[in-house]
Image (cartoon, rainbow, N blue to C red):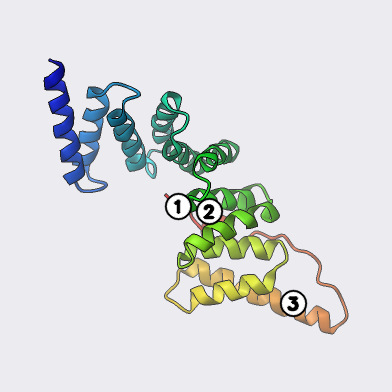
Amino acid sequence: MGRRRSDDVDALLERVEGSEAGSGVRRSLLEQLTELTQPGSEAWALATRELARLMVDREPWRASLLARRVVDQDPGDHLAWGLVGLAQSLLGNHAYAISAYERALVLAPEEPAYLHNLGHLLDACLDRPGDAIALLRRAHLRLRHDAHVTASLAHALARAGAIDEARRLMLAVVRRPALEEHHALYRWLLEEHERAVSLALEGEAAPSRRRRVRASRLTRPLA
């Protein structure tokens, strides 16, 4: 009986590998795997994580529950902690998401998705752009050509007062085909730069402004 069960698991794993990402067939196969495998086993953790990843956009609460089951069995699973962070950020539970990403980063300190998502949460949700910048710089070093990562870094820099650097970063983005929200960020940076120059010519210091520029729409969490 045990051998038959093992054969069934191996067959399901093979079918999962051959299934289309995001498909209903893949979800059904993963659900079968979670039922057939022993909680805490490698196959169970893989199936539960992938099931959580598959449903995180549409069912973030259930995805979070699934990922939590994995970390309850193995607190050292950074992939599952990252999924908890992603799901909770989509649900708007920012403190919980930040805690999960911090756990994930202890385990995988250079994972760019965790660096970006945690940095963006600190900037856009906790109003801590200064604390976000170091994280976002590290993410940007690894994903320099990702427009969302660049926009997150530029947004935090601008809110911390580094308008010129933020403007240069976004210029590289808008020179390529770019989303409207990234053009909107660049236009705001130009306005802020012109305002600072005008005040400098008048002999006045530009007052610090920590405005969010449609922050929730400018960037998105990386899966």
The image position of residue 58, as x and y in percent, is 37, 42
**Which mark is in front, 2 or 3?**
2
- Give the number of marks: 3
Say which amino acid is labelled 1: Leu
Task: Give the residue at mark 2.
Answer: 116
Residue at x 53% of width, y 65% of height: 150
Q: Secondary structure at mark 1?
A: loop
The image's mark for residue 195 is: 3
65 up-or-down from 20: above or below: above
Q: Give the residue at x 81% y 78%.
A: 199
The residue tagged with tag 3: helix, strand or loop? helix
Marks 2,3: beta carbons within 8 A: no
Residue 221 visible in the displayed image: no
Lower sequence index among marks 2 and 3: 2
Disc 2, SS: helix
Which residue is identified by label 1? 222
> The N terminus appears in which quarter of the rendering?
top left
Residue in the image at 59% along x and 54% along y: 135
Q: Amino acid at mark 2?
A: His
> Is 13 on the left or on the right of 114, as rendered?
left
